[in-house]
Amino acid sequence: MRIVAVGYGMFGLYGLIVFLEYILIPYFPYATLELVEHASALLILGGLLTFFVALTRT
């Protein structure tokens, strides 16, 4: 269950980053925020990999 919780946490963290992007637009350059958002897509990959690990361990 911890592995699945980590996977959901990665998806949640990605959603938080996308949400905060719109709040932080006035304070940071747009290019920087876009770079962070696109780089955080690796969290989606990490979440999918943790679900794969959880499925193969059962």
Image: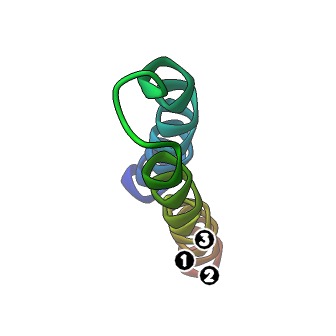
For label 3, the SS is helix
Residue under numbered circle 3: 45
Residue 40 position, x and y percent, is: 49, 58
N-term-proximal mark, 1 vs 3: 3
Give the crowd class for mark 2: few <14, some 14-19, many >=20 residues within 10 Å.
few
Indicate which label's residue lies in the foreground, 2 or 3: 3
Give the crowd class for mark 3: few <14, some 14-19, many >=20 residues within 10 Å.
some
Vertically, is 17 above or below 31?
Answer: above
Q: Of 42 and 52, which appears nearest the observer?
A: 42
Name the side, left or right, on which 19 lies relative to 6.
Answer: right
**x 34%, y 26%: residue:** 27
N-term-proximal mark, 2 vs 3: 3
**Residue type at tag 2:** Thr
Determine the CA span between mark 2 and mark 1. Answer: 5 Å
Vertically, is 57 above or below 13?
Answer: below
**x 56%, y 52%: residue:** 34
Name the side, left or right, on which 2 lies relative to 19.
Answer: left
Indicate which label's residue lies in the foreground, 2 or 1: 1
Q: Quadrant of the C terminus?
A: bottom right
Image marks 2 and 1: residues in contact by CB distance under 8 Å: yes
For label 1, the SS is helix
Residue 56 position, x and y percent, is: 62, 81
**Residue type at tag 3:** Leu
Is residue 7 visible in the rendered image? The answer is: no
Q: Of 38 and 24, which appears nearest the observer?
A: 24
Residue under numbered circle 1: 53
Residue under numbered circle 2: 56
Give the crowd class for mark 1: few <14, some 14-19, many >=20 residues within 10 Å.
some
**x 43%, y 59%: residue:** 3
Determine the CA span between mark 2 and mark 3. Answer: 17 Å
**x 36%, y 36%: residue:** 28
Indicate which label's residue lies in the foreground, 1 or 3: 3
